[in-house]
Amino acid sequence: MSGWDDDLSEWLKPFLARLGHKARRRMCPLYVAGLIGAGERKSVGPMAERLAPGDYDQLHHFVSSGTWDAAALEEELVIQADQLVGGPDAVLVIDDTALPKKGSHSVGVGPQYASALGKNANCQTLVSLTLAKDEVPVAVGLRLFLPESWTGDSARLSRAGVPEACRAARTKPEIALAEIDRVMAAGLTFGTVLADAGYGLSAPFRHGLSARGLTWAVGIPGRQKVFPAGVALIFPVAGRGRPRKNAVPDVLSISAETMLDDASWTELSWRIGTKGPLRAKFAAVRVRIADGPPQRIWDKGQQHLPGEEAWVIGEYRVSGERKYYLSNLPADADLVMLAATIKARWICEQAHQQMKEELGLDHFEGRSWPGLHRHALMTMIAYAFLQHRRVKAGGGKKNRPRATSADPARRSQSRFRSTRRPSTTALPTLSHQATATRVKLPK
């Protein structure tokens, strides 16, 4: 080890106090140190060979089949993360990350969409929760999604050690809401929940966030239907027959893309990358989301009634790509705040990449549910420790030079053309302070 081992031992004390058994208290620091230390592979065998050649069996037993309670350490991780980066100006980013696998025996593995690869692949998918503030992300949740090929096979679930409570089919948004409940119950504090369109297109997910009193900003497909904010429910006078029992909207819903066609677009720079300011054009309109109860509307058949009032936000990137978002941020939020909020989601992708490339999140070679989740938990603990050292050393954003504030530029019509390619930003390594300065997320 190279100077951080004493710091790690001290930082792990509240975790070890929850483990109880002496052997487990010895294996936990060893496992975390193996993830942080040098070496190409971060699976049990190579880590034991590097750090404790005579302890392979104990290290393997600790992560794969020991009887210790992971929930206690998950709760302590939430407490430590909240002390590090929690607060009303923090964001909680919901996403998922894929672990490519060969074969069919590892728990949850199967052909499914891998966002990191941009295509379907044989992999495991973990729903992730990342708490972030001042561009310091800390992973607080990684929970495996089980495809239908697993939830429909009880014998397969038993062989992989999947707990009875986790065997029912659940969508990724359902898993995310359950994880949000877990971290909130443990005391995690944050201001806004962020998610991409994979979660934002789910009306039950958005409804679940609002029902919990949370502020949120999520990606959506451009086809998502919305109503103007001023839509009214009326009772049309029937020309014949019985009067209508249910009110209908006085206008029909349209797509989010169409809603922004006539909006004014403003060029904003939300942060400074390694190649200069990152810019895009943004527009926002206040709407009501078409996700209320379904009902026959005029002659259009079953349609969704107006639901919650929200912002629909459009982003036009220099590459020519358009992205769309919904947010229940207050009606008086300005475009700079809306743009800065939706663009804060990028930090979780950095966390995923660093946990894989530097800490071996995707190196676990076991096949069981407990083993995978314990390895993921140890990886999150190792990542939180490194972020603790980063903040302690003054590596947070607030200690770096101030970035230029997001500046409104020229306004133009909704049809933009550009041949420029989007700039790319290199990720800082965990052991070094990031060199890019960025706009602070508005409170």
Image (cartoon, rainbow, N blue to C red):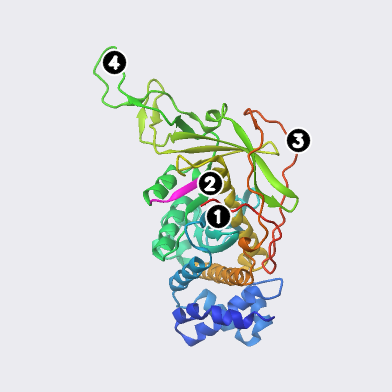
Q: Which residue is mark 3?
A: 419
**SS class, disc 3:** loop
Q: Is residue 210 above or below residue 362?
A: above
**SS class, disc 2:** helix
Q: Amino acid at mark 1?
A: Asp
Q: Is residue 216 above or below residue 180?
A: above
440 sits to left or right of 176: right
Q: Amino acid at mark 4?
A: Ala
In this view, the residue in front, 152 or 320, is 320
Q: What main secondary structure does the magenta stretch of the protein show?
A: strand
Q: Which residues are magenta?
A: 213-217
Look at 52% across and 29% down and name the residue there: 259
Q: Are marks 1 and 2 in contact (CB under 8 Å)?
A: yes
Q: CA distance from mark 2 to mark 3?
A: 28 Å
Q: Nearer the viewer, mark 2 or mark 3?
A: 3
Query: In the image, residue 96 lies at what x, y percent?
Result: 55, 55
Look at 60% across and 85% down and name the residue there: 55
186 sits to left or right of 342: left
Q: Which residue is mark 4?
A: 238
Q: Which residue is mark 2?
A: 198
- Residue 365 appears in the rendering: no
Q: Is residue 320 above or below residue 390?
A: above
**SS class, disc 4:** loop
Query: In the image, residue 33 lies at what x, y percent?
Result: 62, 78
Q: CA distance from mark 4 to mark 1?
A: 50 Å
Q: Residues within 10 Å of mark 1 (few under 14, many from 20)?
A: many
